Every structure is written in structure tokens, then in C-alpha cells.
Image (cartoon, helix red, strand yellow):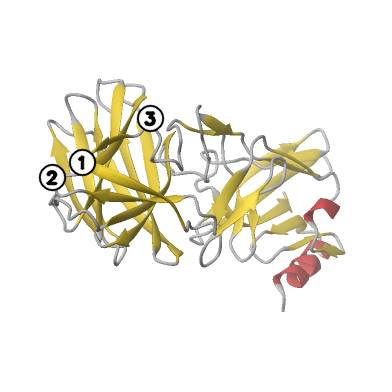
Amino acid sequence: MRPGLRISIDAQRGRVTFTLNFESGQYSWGATYTTDITKLPGYTYTRSGAKQELAATSGLVSFAANVPGIVPNVGYWARTAMTNLLLQSQAFESAVWVKSVATVVVNSSAPDDSVTADKIVPDNLGVASVLQSVTTAATSTYTFSVFAKPSGFNWLEVAFFDGVDGQRHWFNLATGALGSTDNIGLGFTSVSASTKFVGSGWYRCTLTVTTRAGTAMQVYQYPTNGDLVVTPGDGTSGVHLWQAQLVAGNQPGPVIVTTTAAATVGADALAVGVANGKYNALFTFDDNSTQTIAVTVSGGSYALPVYPTLIRSLVKRLLLETV
């Protein structure tokens, strides 16, 4: 039985006021069923700024401002506002990215099917890097992410450095496996790393750190050819990079493109009309974990919370039950 139909029957028994099945695209309340979320009673949605989110298997899905980030067969992204602090996020040839013994070859195929990726080619004079300096807050958590693809070199080293302390991590771009983590000075107080395959050989590499006392941060990217090593170039081999971003918090966020200034995508604000009263809102997330939130509706509308009120930002289903 389809989830939408089962939930409608439950609703007729008086247990569920409405359900939003973002994963399957089925939405129902009472005896009414629809695949168009805008047909829900009292539906409203706002979000400033355009963004891109990861698709179900590969690639990305683009969302204009005020269009909810619902990815078919994935779910609904319920995010707080996020700002990409790095400038020229898709233009590593820009002067804001400081190059050391490296050449940038522009306009290669990117994960979103554009030609906005760049290849970083270390020359044969030494260890190559591209870096950008950014102002951060002391003892605060930040997440860096970049889409990377091997092109002669199979590894990428990402490093944070505040002038005294820092952290670096290696990513295997051939397999998506995580490499080693190494401290610079005292290192940072917490570190996590991950990769996400997005198709066509591309991985989104993510590194989360909590800073120490320094507020002037440098973010380095080193094309290399092994774990815990930095490799001099041959003038040809390198790594493709696309869409670098640094955001506050412990999640990489959606793709937020920048040019000459930092850019912000606003919080997701989705609401639906329901009768006043007390409810239990049961959220199921992308990893099938769940969270129940007690809700009191007094104005005839329920506004869905976002992460970090929610324990995860990607919602598969929401059921709102009367208490």
C-alpha cells in the first residue's frame, strides 16, 4: 500500500491530522490526497537566496528563492540561514585565491553540468596550494567543503591555519575514503571529515573544525598523490575543484555561490494550516532516525522547525498527530 494512502486512512480514524511525505512526494490530510504540496491548506513557504542541493544519486538540484528544497526520492532540506564566507567560490583563478607554485586551468565540467570547475595543476618546483584568508570567530565551529575530482593526482589535502594552530586532513579522491588527520601546532579542539559521491568522479569533501583563539583563518587546498604526504607536481597532473565554501556550524550546507562578497541563503520557512490544539509532530530523517516534538497550535498554522531544532536537516516524512 502506498504510504500516502495508508496515512489517509489513519487520518480518517482521527489519529493523524496531516502528513508530509517529502521523500515520495505524497501529501495528505483528512480524506484529501495530493502530490502538489502547494495544495495543502494554509501552505506558505519563503526562503531568500537561490541554492543547490544534492540529488538522490548524482548531480545537484537547483532551487530558486522561495522554492522549497524538496529533492525527489530524498526529502526536504530544513535548514537555518547559512553564509558562505569564501569569495569567488567557483573561480580559483581569481586573485582572492592565492596560488603557490600552481597553475589554474579554468572552465572544466562541474557536478552541476556547467563548465565552472577549475583544475589545479602543481608545477615541478615544489608543493602546490591554493588558499584564501577569512575572518572567523574564536572557539567557534566552521565547516569547509569543496567538490573535488582526480586528474592525475588522486588525493586532496585540506588545511586550516590561524597563524599558530591548525588542522589538516587528506581525502582519497579515487575511492572517497578518508585519509589521515594531522595537527598543526596544538591543532583544533574538534575535527570531523566526510566525503559524499555526487557522480562523474566527483566527491564533496567536508572538514569541520572548532577554532582556537585565532580569528584570521587561512583555508588551504593541496593537490597531492598520497595520504599524509605533499607531492611536488609534474606540470600536468592535478585535481579538479569546484565550489569551495566555509560556513558557520557543523554542516556543509547547500551550494552557495559567491563572487566578490560573501553570500547568504535564508532559513527555510514552511508552514501549513491546521486547527488550533495540541499535537505531536513526528519527523523521520534521511538516516531513518526520528524525533517527536510536542506542538501547540494557536493561530491556525504550524511552522515546521529547521535544524538545529531538528536533530537533522534532511526530513523524509512528517506526521502531525492529535494528542
Name which residue type carries label 2: Leu
Q: Look at discs 3 and 2 and give the one toward the viewer.
A: 2
Q: Name the residue tied to disc 3.
A: 96
State whether residue 9 appears in this view.
yes
Give the x, y percent position of residue 260: 50, 28
Mark 1–mark 2 CB contact (< 8 Å): yes
Q: Which residue is rendered at x = 29% and y = 45% of the image?
A: 103
Count of numbered labels shown in the rendering: 3
Q: Measure how far apart labels 1 and 3 are at the Cα level.
A: 16 Å
Q: Which residue is rendered at x = 12% and y = 51% of the image?
A: 229
Give the x, y percent position of residue 268: 64, 40
Mark 1–mark 3 CB contact (< 8 Å): no
Front-most of residues 174 and 46: 174
Relative to 23, 12 lies left or right? right
Callout 3: SS: loop
Q: Name the residue tied to disc 2.
A: 125
Q: Name the residue tied to disc 1.
A: 101
